[in-house]
Image: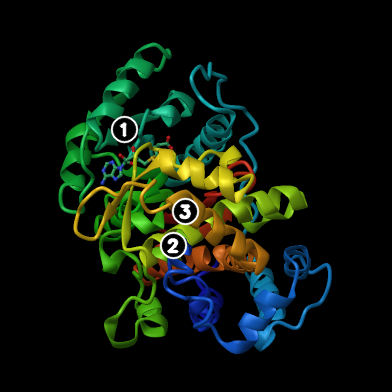
Amino acid sequence: MACSSAPADLLSDLANFVLEVKFLYDFSNVRVMAEQRLDKMPKEWRELLHSRRPREILEALEGKQPMDGPGDFFARRNALLDRIAHLLVPPPASPAEALPRRTWKGMSPKKVQEVEALASLVHRVCSDSGTSAVVDAGCGLAHLERALDPSLRVLAVEANAGHCSGAARRLAGSGVCQTKVFHDVFDVEEEALPLKVSESLGPEKVVLVGLHCCGDLAPTLLRVLAKDSRLAAAVLVPCCYHRTKSQSNIVMSDKGREVMCNDGEVPFSYPALRLACQEPLETWMDMSDEELHERARFQGFRAVLEDFCQSQELTLTKRKRRCVRKSGVQSPEVYAEEVLEAYEFRTEEGGGQSCEECDFKRKLSNALQSQVDRGFLEVLLNLTILQLSLQRLLEYVIILDRCLFASENKLSVQLFELFEAKVSPRNKVVVCSRD
Ligand SMILES: C[S@@+](CC[C@H](N)C(=O)[O-])C[C@H]1O[C@@H](n2cnc3c(N)ncnc32)[C@H](O)[C@@H]1O
């Protein structure tokens, strides 16, 4: 990605587009009925949601059949996706000499694909920067360390002590050279990282790496790179944008603030950031109609349950980690039965509710059936598809803003998608380097 005006213009157009249709996604789908979100949408959107079949909308989004969406939605969205595709550079080819093969015991095929591709990219960035020192920030179970070139000196840090001890065990049994890889429990913060880096790796220039660095971690690494000239580059694969705590890390660049933050307010709330890191729409395009409708029942029944409890002045508390099983959505009756096992109910006054007393099961399954008959599940499925159609655009608003922050701080930036999206959807890599 060149540091021209193209990313800035694209950021501005993407942001304006997604903010124009904020009413489609700026809430939790569980609360869609309880908060009457569908009724509050503009009329032409309500008509679209009620009149089309989910497959038709999917095909319009794929560009297979034209559809007149409100405000030319489909054509504008697809044109923006084309502009994103033009901005990306192809991922660099793997080095001619393959990195040494390791045993990948305990690693999923997804993780193997990720660490192999990233290790070879890190190797290249280190060569280009003339350094062999790397910091892996938020290393988790230190999977990446098993794939990195053995010539590199690595400081792998992780805030979660439990992960760290798991990582230490795995590293010890993996044949990774223990004098080259230092491993420590450490919470990466802007002020503390430079000292930690010099203590562990000495005066050599350093490349920062973060594989799936969630929330504030990727922005923090970018800020440290921008400030500390001893750091040569950063190779960042961000994820979990909704875990970002600091507002200044959601929109980082001057340009981003100029185009998005009226009165200094960051316009993306939790549901928008959550949507930005959902699975891509392509996953849904491959689903059969039956699979789509199963998803619709799962989501739709949960939304009806929420609304039902609100109308009965009941609060729900999960009993188990996973609420209702997949098989529980086969019919309203089975769902109502499962709900009683999965949740505890309390009245507003705090007393536990006797479900026989209030005839809970019968009333809930009637409420569910009535929404099935009114076509609510299909409408919610249409809405979910439209929300997911914005996922990639929202993610690129965040990513391009970070690229612009790097450019504004005189760093050169490359942006590409390193892993296969269907295997690993958080596949966007931002490589920032000091010239
Ligand atoms: C999604 S996991 C990825 C782990 C690993 N990089 C991988 O790809 O397998 C993100 C990790 O970053 C760690 N983390 C998040 N913020 C951190 C911080 N400020 N300092 C150190 N570790 C952090 C989390 O504890 C978590 O283990």
Between 377 and 25, the residue placed more toward the observer is: 377
Q: Nearer the viewer, residue 345 or 187?
A: 345
Vertical position of residue 195 compared to residue 386: above or below? above
Q: Write down which quadrant ligand 1 falls in.
A: top left
Q: Nearer the viewer, residue 134 or 156?
A: 156
Badge nearest the viewer, 2 or 1: 2
Instruction: Report the amino acid beneath label 2.
Output: Phe
Could you tell me residue 45's position as x and y percent? Answer: 62, 82
Tell me the distance, in whole angstroms, between the alpha carbons under discs 1 and 3: 19 Å
- The image's mark for residue 308 is 2
Residue 55 appears left or right of 352: right
Q: Residue at position x 16%, y 43% from top?
A: 195
What colour scheme was applied to this rendering of the protein?
rainbow
Looking at the rendered structure, which numbered label has been put on residue 431? 3
What is the spatial separation of the Cα atoms under label 2 and label 1, in whole angstroms? 49 Å
- Kind of residue sitting beneath label 3: Val
Q: Residue at x 69, y 70 (%)?
A: 82
Going 51% across and 67% down the picture, which residue do you hit?
394
Looking at this view, name the residue that lies furthest to the right: 65
How many residues crowd mark 1 within 10 Å: few (<14), some (14–19), many (20+)? many
| CA gap, disc 3 and disc 2 | 49 Å
Is the C-beta of the residue carrying label 3 under 8 Å from the nearest atom of ligand 1?
no
